[in-house]
Image: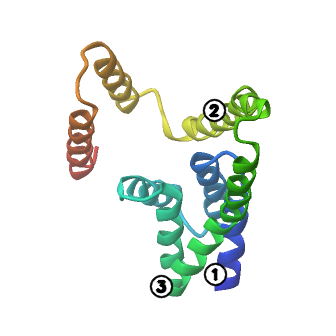
Amino acid sequence: MGLGELFRLFLRAGMIFGGGVTIMAELSRELVERRGVVTRADFLTLYGLARIVPSGSMTALAVAYGYVFGRWPGAFVALTGVALPALVPVMALVVLYERVQGSPWLGVLPNTLMPAAVALLAGAVLSLGREVARPSLELAIAVAAFASVLALRLDPSLLLVAGGVIGALRLRDGN
């Protein structure tokens, strides 16, 4: 994949409304299903790694795939592509916000934009969840961890570490 194609791919991904999960779903469709340049397992592994580095997940994913397909120039091109579509609207919204600050129109936004954003996010999560989550031990562990955090008030960071250790042990044993 050339640098121009890499830029266009991540530019299109960056234009998707709905944030990280919807962008990730589109990149998965494009790289795994349509182009076949990455396996589903490799994509999910790199996505998992992108989730744990101290940056935005899509930023990290763009840099990672940019590097995979074009080394350092590819990382720069992919990062630019995914970030550029958000830069211009955010700058315009900041200017607009300063002008309408205190206006009654600003109070309407939570009632209109939030349901749309939640619906887009839910659709992407359900779409990816069907592929990843199987009625299995992983799903049972996730439900138990969620219940433990809510009911027992356990520290989520301890559960994340425990989950990482369990996952590493399962991978090492080939389970």
Q: Is residue 21 left or right of residue 151?
A: right
Q: Is residue 15 left or right of residue 121?
A: right
Q: Which mark is residue 37?
A: none
Q: Secondary structure at mark 2?
A: helix
Distance Cα–Cα, label 1 vs label 2: 31 Å
Q: Quadrant of the N terminus?
A: bottom right
Assess whether mark 1 and mark 3 are in contact (beta carbons under 8 angstroms): no
Percent of width and height locating residue 19: 62, 48
Q: Is residue 78 visible?
A: yes
Please give the residue where the numbered disc 1 appears in the rendered image: 1
Percent of width and height locating residue 103: 76, 34
Distance Cα–Cα, label 3 vs label 1: 14 Å
Q: Secondary structure at mark 3?
A: helix
Amino acid at dot 3: Trp
**Which residue is at the front of the view, 87 or 121?**
87
Residue beneath the point at 23% across and 48% down: 168
- Residue 28: quadrant of the picture: bottom right
Q: Which mark is residue 72?
A: 3
Percent of width and height locating residue 116: 73, 33
Q: Is residue 142 left or right of residue 35?
A: left
Amino acid at dot 2: Ala
Q: Secondary structure at mark 1?
A: loop
Distance Cα–Cα, label 2 vs label 3: 34 Å
**Which residue is at the front of the view, 158 or 88?**
88
The mark nearer the N terminus, 2 or 3, is 3
Q: Is residue 34 visible?
A: no
Residue beneath the point at 72% across and 53% down: 93
In the displayed structure, would residue 93 be above or below residue 153?
A: below
Q: Quadrant of the C terminus?
A: top left
Please give the residue where the numbered disc 2 appears in the rendered image: 122
Amino acid at dot 1: Met
Percent of width and height locating residue 124: 64, 40
